[in-house]
Image: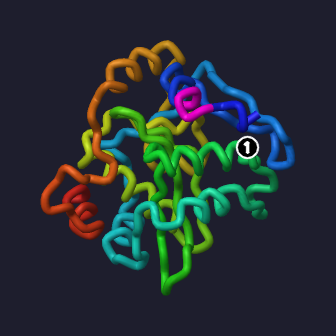
Amino acid sequence: MADHISINDILAAYSCGLFPMADNAEDEEFFWYDPPLRGQLSIENLHIPARLKRTVLSDIYDVRIDTAFADVIDGCASYTDERPKTWINKGIRDLFISLHQSGYAHSIECWQDGVLKGGLYGLALGGFFSGESMFSRARDASKVALVHLCARLHKGGFKILDTQFTNDHLDQFGVYEITREEYLMKLQPVLSIQSDFLLENISPAPTERALIRDYLA
């Protein structure tokens, strides 16, 4: 299926509120979803527990952007005891690597001693960011990546952070739901915003340390 879908097809689907998921990684095909309720996180007012805030500020992880996108998506697709199945199949992986190569998909990565310990990836379009998936191989790695994501989205002028669904992991960050209709009303006006995920229009470009300290101040 992925062989017949262009980058423009994917962007058009996300612009209409759709996103792809497979039933499991072994499936050859995937489906486009448009759930009646959408999970959302506040970019400006992300709820960050005090202990996690201390971890973020401790610089325990070296946070990098877009240096290992394929490794991040593979980490998100890996089976764990907590995640015995995954919705990321080869078709979705191929699509998102193409999106990354075209500048639309990005990864936030947490490294420690040269080893990738966790991260997340998603799609940036206009003033909208769709958080697709995250993974962690060390304590709080995916959570630290999420805080860094929000700091970057805030600085880059983004207005929507879509999580697609809600779950227990996101509850601590203040995830909430809105209806499909509310989501589409919010989405359409921000698609034309000239946001800046890579912060290329900010001079000098802030370091991750400066970015996160400004966000948490």
Q: Nearer the viewer, residue 69 or 61?
A: 69
Residue farthest to the bottom? 113
Q: Quadrant of residue 81?
A: bottom right
Q: Quadrant of the N terminus?
A: top right
**For numbered disc 1, what is the local secondary structure?**
helix
| 151 relative to 53, above or below | above
Q: Is residue 171 visible?
A: no
Tell whether 20 sits left or right of 188.
right
- The x and y percentages for residue 193 are 28, 29
Q: Is residue 143 magenta?
A: no
Magenta span covers which residues?
A: 6-10
What residue do we see at 41% from left, 15% from top?
185
- The x and y percentages for residue 6 are 60, 32
Residue underneath mark 1: 91
What residue do we see at 68% from left, 43% from top?
92
Residue type at mark 1 is Gly
- The x and y percentages for residue 158 are 31, 38
What residue do we see at 53% from left, 44% from top?
99
Q: Is residue 111 visible?
A: yes
| 71 relative to 90, above or below | below
Tell whether 132 sits left or right of 211.
right
**Looking at the image, how many numbered discs can be counted on the residues?**
1
